[in-house]
Image: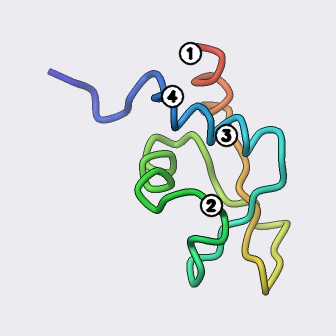
Amino acid sequence: MTSPKPHRPTTAQRAVLLRIRDEVVRHNPLSPRRSGISAATLAVLFKAGWIEHDDADVDRENGRRLILTNAGRGALEAS
């Protein structure tokens, strides 16, 4: 039986996690393409618990900043 949470990110997911770790990446649900990350990839990363919104860093025009969770940092270290 497979786990609903992947233990290791795919190459594309790892690239996004590294980008979120190293840069300020914002996500605006009204303009999801602005972040340059596909909606499907974001959905997987959110569901895995690897990223979350930083509610303290909100920009009305550009959206909320994406940050790595502890699980996201662990997934990067494991891959």
Helix, strand or loop status at disc 4: helix
Tell me what residue is drawn at x 47 percent, y 22 percent.
Answer: 8
How far apart are the two marked residues, 1 and 3, measured between alpha carbons? 16 Å
Looking at the image, the residue that sits furthest to the top is: 78
Helix, strand or loop status at disc 1: loop
Nearer-N-terminus badge (1/4): 4
Dots 1 and 4: beta carbons under 8 Å?
no
Q: Dot 2 corresponds to which residue?
A: 36
**In this view, the mark in front (2 or 3):** 2
The image quarter containing residue 6 is top left
Looking at the image, the residue that sits furthest to the left is: 1
Above or below, 29 against 79 in this view is below
The image quarter containing residue 28 is bottom right
How far apart are the two marked residues, 2 and 4, measured between alpha carbons? 16 Å
Q: Dot 4 corresponds to which residue?
A: 11
Can you say which quadrant of the picture contains the N terminus?
Answer: top left
- Left or right: residue 20 versus residue 31 is right
Q: Dot 3 corresponds to which residue?
A: 69
Nearer-N-terminus badge (1/3): 3
